[in-house]
Structures are given as structure tokens and as C-alpha cells.
Amino acid sequence: MTTNQKLWSKTVLSSYNYLKRLCDSIDKLIENTAVNSYYSFSYKNGENSIANISKKIINLSNRKIDYINLKVLTEKALKDMPKEQAKLLVLKFIHKIPIQTICNLSNISKRSAYRKLEQAIMAFMLVLSRYGYSAEKFELDYSGDPFVSSIYKLIKRSNFVLEEKAEVITNDSVFNKYINELMASAI
């Protein structure tokens, strides 16, 4: 397995929590775009032409489909791997439980927790690979997505080691920034 596959696995797990909210936001944007197009339509205004509004709605719908697929892929991969490893990934990446708390809950040393976490990530990578999701496939499907690629770049830049509190703040700030950009593009 490649380093990029590991990075994409962590990206998928780290972005999971935000996917439902992103889909809900996209639904609202689609609705607002459609409703507002009625009031702002002008034959002279090419930006609000039916074709441009339709393209905007189709692009938003395609983004939502990508997020739904990523969410389903994550859930299926977690379900298809050993329960103990899946639980560890859920605690660390989805619930964002600090490693020290995981150690206390599991009654294991920090070193054991990191070793088990590494093994769980490798198992997750293998499951994704069985589904045909290599680093190249993720690059092709998600490197152009502003939200997912931001998390990927953040994880890559941090070289796999994020401060516990900084991870939550940074992921939330990436999410909020993306939502604001999404909203601005729909106006």
C-alpha cells in the first residue's frame, strides 16, 4: 500500500462527519437557486439564464452524489473490517476522541493505541482497495473537490500527526470555510 492510499484513507475517515451536513447544505442551495432564479431571471442577464441556473443545480447535485457515495463507502468499509479495528477508527476519526481518552477507555498504553490505530488504518485501506478505491481512484474522484481535497492537503501537510485539539478545530474551520464558499458561489 502506498503513502497516498494511507492519506486518502485518513481523509475519508476525517471527512465522514461533515458529509451529511454538506448534503443538507447543498439541498438548501439547490432550493434557493431554483426559487431565486424565478425572481432574478432576465433575458439580458446571461448569468441568470436558464442554462446557467441548470448547470449550477446539476453541479451541486453531482457534488451531493459524490458526498453520498463517500459516506456509503466509509460505512460499508467500516462494516466489512474487524469490529475492534472499526471501533478504534470511529472513536479516533469520526468521534474525534483524543488518543489518551481512547487509551483510558481501552485500558491500553499509548504506544499500543498508536500501533492498533496504525493496524486499523491498514485494514481500512485494504477494504477500500478491495472495493476498487486506490489512491489513484480517490485522486480522480475527489482531488477536484474543494472540501475533500482541503482535508487531504491538511493531513498530508501534517505528515499524519495532528494535534488532538487542532485536528477538530482545523477540520471544523475547513468545513465552515467550504460552506461559506459554497453559499457565495450559489448567490
Image (spheres, rainbow, N blue to C red):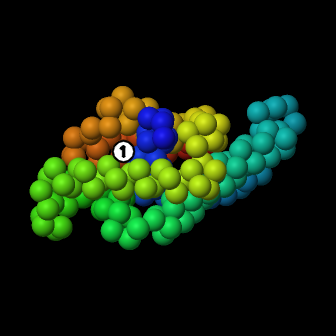
The residue sitting at 21% across, 55% down in the picture is 113
Q: Residue furthest right?
A: 43
| Quarter of the figure that contains the C terminus | top right
Q: Position of residue 130 (x, y in %)?
A: 59, 55
* Residue type (three-letter) at the residue carrying disc 1: Asn
The quadrant holding residue 86 is bottom left
Q: Is residue 155 left or right of residue 78?
A: left
Q: Position of residue 58 (x, y in %)?
A: 75, 48
Q: Which residue is mark 1?
A: 171
Q: Is residue 34 left or right of residue 121?
A: right
Q: Is residue 94 above or below residue 58?
A: below
Q: Say whether residue 184 is visible.
A: no
Q: Say whether residue 5 is visible.
A: yes
The residue sitting at 84% across, 44% down in the picture is 50
Q: Is residue 100 above or below residue 160?
A: below
Q: Residues within 10 Å of mark 1 (few under 14, many from 20)?
A: many
Looking at this view, is 69 or 178 the one in front? Answer: 69
Q: Is residue 141 above or below residue 72?
A: above
Dot 1 lies on which element?
helix
Q: Position of residue 59 (x, y in %)?
A: 71, 44
Q: Residue furthest top?
A: 157
The residue sitting at 52% across, 57% down in the picture is 127
